[in-house]
Image (cartoon, grey):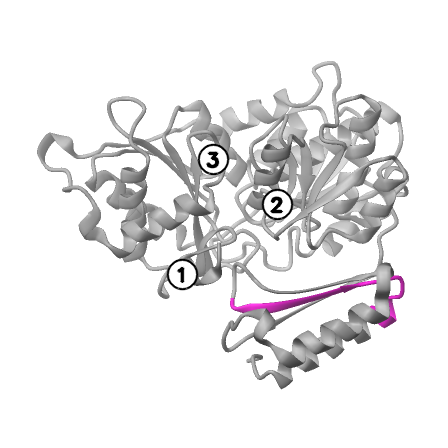
């Protein structure tokens, strides 16, 4: 779907600065009404489950969304702070008609977002999001609001974290424990700060936790999946076997080996694809990645007779392709990993469990497992823009891209795109030499400046 068709939704729900249009309570209430209408109840009444991360603005949007849904006669189930994949799981388990997550994922605390899951636990496709937008912008198309006995009712699921914890532990082999394993967890002061330590400790691991004291404003602040170096230092300092850094809403993770080296989403896919192939569990003859997936993963998997299919950036696009073509492993370099035999969406805690399972089965440390994948140097630049004209209309930028692509040949890639969650342009250059790709990326950014789009 073209960006021009989408007024509110980006690659992962509605995202922006909290209390700045369009992310204001009035729009949140309208979204609550639209969702209540778009997902009529499978029972007598529509049931909508609402969860959030630890941002201070979450209370405001939680109330606004619920108000909209209740005013249309839908029942609302609150679960409080819990990782995004927990919402997907509980939506299915509670037979809810839709799940709502209030989170801006890895963004700073002043941002927030609203994203939705269908009753099947999968994120909404573009065409459904467009219909939701139409109802938000044209409230006259909504049916009459509820009155009298038709108002919705609100209740809270008090044991939501416990239910999700049990689900996660059930995905780990019943004949194995994590006894003797020391794990460092960075919970990003986000939605996973309670459940992540609980899962690994109850499986027998010795758990060291940082980023587990959210105050409403410190989510993702110098911690979590965007800042895994601090976790690497903690792993080395305490001689941990592995480190796991979640992002603010817990749907992605970066791993750290016993030496403090970072293993990103591509590295995890390489490890898990190899293991699943050996055990005859890998479907589709490869994995699904995105345009940002490192070319090194392609090279590593090609040696094993496997391939990488690329989609647009966004884990829901990865999931859509996996479902359409029968893959069961996919993900993003940023740490969104999709294990569709276990979950309908990215889950950082689950990703950690999957890697630990491979470590225990093989008796190999994470550094050894990660050694089978050689990551090509990749430079990523992100710059604020004053406007978002179509990339193909940027004459200077496109000329620079053509020149860089010609110089790289088959030994590298260039990706220029707008962010789906913020008003920025992103430039990625990948190739065999780090200094070279950095120079090429700067060359393209300079061209963006000549096209007068940079802020």
The mark found on residue 192 in the picture is: none
Residue at which label 2 appears: 187
In the rendered image, the quadrant that contains the C terminus is bottom right
Q: Residues within 10 Å of mark 1 (few under 14, many from 20)?
A: many
**How far separated are the C-alphas under marks 1 and 2?**
22 Å
- Sequence-wise, which precedes: disc 3 or disc 2? 3
**How far separated are the C-alphas under marks 3 and 2?**
17 Å
Q: Where's residue 349, x and y in %?
A: 64, 36
Q: Where's residue 135, x and y in %?
A: 28, 50
Mark yes or no: residue 59 visible: no
Instruction: Using residue 115 as the reference point, say whether residue 397 is left or right of it.
Output: right
Q: Nearer the viewer, residue 190 or 136?
A: 136
Tag 2 secondary structure? loop
Total numbered labels placed on residues in the image: 3
Q: Residues within 10 Å of mark 2 (few under 14, many from 20)?
A: many
Does the magenta run of residues contain 432?
A: yes
**Residue at the (60%, 31%) spot, across then down:** 198
The answer to whether the residue labelled 1 contacts the one labelled 3, judged by CB atoms less than 8 Å apart, is no
- Sequence-wise, which precedes: disc 1 or disc 3? 1
């Amino acid at each position: 779907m073209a960006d021009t068709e989408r007024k509110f939704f980006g690659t992962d729900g509605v995202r922006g600065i909290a209390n700045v249009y369009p992310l204001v309570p009035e729009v949140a209430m309208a979204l609550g009404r639209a969702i209540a209408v778009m997902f009529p109840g499978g029972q007598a009444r529509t049931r909508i489950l609402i969860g959030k991360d630890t941002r201070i603005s979450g209370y405001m949007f939680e109330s606004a969304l619920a108000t909209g849904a209740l005013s249309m006669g839908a029942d609302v189930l609150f679960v409080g702070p819990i990782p995004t994949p927990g919402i997907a799981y509980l939506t299915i388990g509670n037979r809810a008609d839709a799940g709502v997550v209030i989170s801006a994922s890895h963004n700073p605390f002043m941002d927030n977002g609203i994203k939705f899951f269908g009753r099947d636990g999968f994120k909404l496709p573009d065409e459904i999001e467009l219909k939701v937008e139409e109802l938000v912008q044209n409230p006259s198309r909504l049916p009459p609001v509820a009155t009298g006995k038709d108002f919705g009712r609100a209740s809270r699921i008090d044991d939501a974290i416990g239910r999700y914890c049990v689900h996660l532990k059930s995905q780990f082999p019943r004949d194995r424990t994590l006894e003797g394993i020391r794990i460092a967890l960075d919970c990003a002061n986000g939605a996973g700060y309670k459940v992540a330590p609980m899962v690994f400790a109850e499986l027998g691991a010795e758990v060291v936790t940082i980023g587990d004291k959210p105050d409403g404003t410190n989510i993702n602040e110098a911690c979590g999946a965007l800042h895994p170096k601090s976790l690497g230092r903690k792993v080395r300092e305490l001689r941990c076997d592995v480190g796991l850094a979640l992002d603010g809403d817990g749907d992605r993770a970066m791993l750290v080996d016993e030496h403090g080296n970072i293993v990103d989403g591509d590295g995890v896919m390489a490890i898990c694809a190899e293991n699943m192939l050996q055990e005859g569990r890998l479907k589709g003859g490869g994995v699904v990645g995105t345009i940002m997936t490192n070319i090194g993963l392609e090279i590593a998997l090609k040696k094993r007779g496997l391939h990488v299919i690329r989609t647009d950036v966004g884990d829901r696009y990865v999931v859509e392709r996996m479902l359409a073509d029968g893959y069961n492993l996919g993900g993003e370099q940023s740490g969104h990993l999709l294990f569709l035999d276990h979950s309908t969406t990215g889950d950082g805690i689950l990703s950690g469990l999957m890697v630990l399972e491979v470590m225990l089965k093989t008796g190999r440390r994470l550094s050894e497992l990660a050694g089978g994948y050689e990551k090509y140097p990749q430079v990523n630049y992100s710059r604020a823009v004053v406007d978002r004209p179509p990339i193909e209309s940027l004459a200077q930028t496109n000329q620079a891209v053509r020149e860089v692509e010609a110089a790289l040949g088959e030994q590298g890639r260039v990706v220029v795109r707008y962010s789906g969650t913020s008003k920025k342009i992103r430039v990625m250059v990948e190739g065999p030499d780090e200094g070279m790709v950095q120079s090429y990326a700067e060359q393209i950014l300079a061209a963006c400046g000549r096209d007068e789009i940079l802020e």
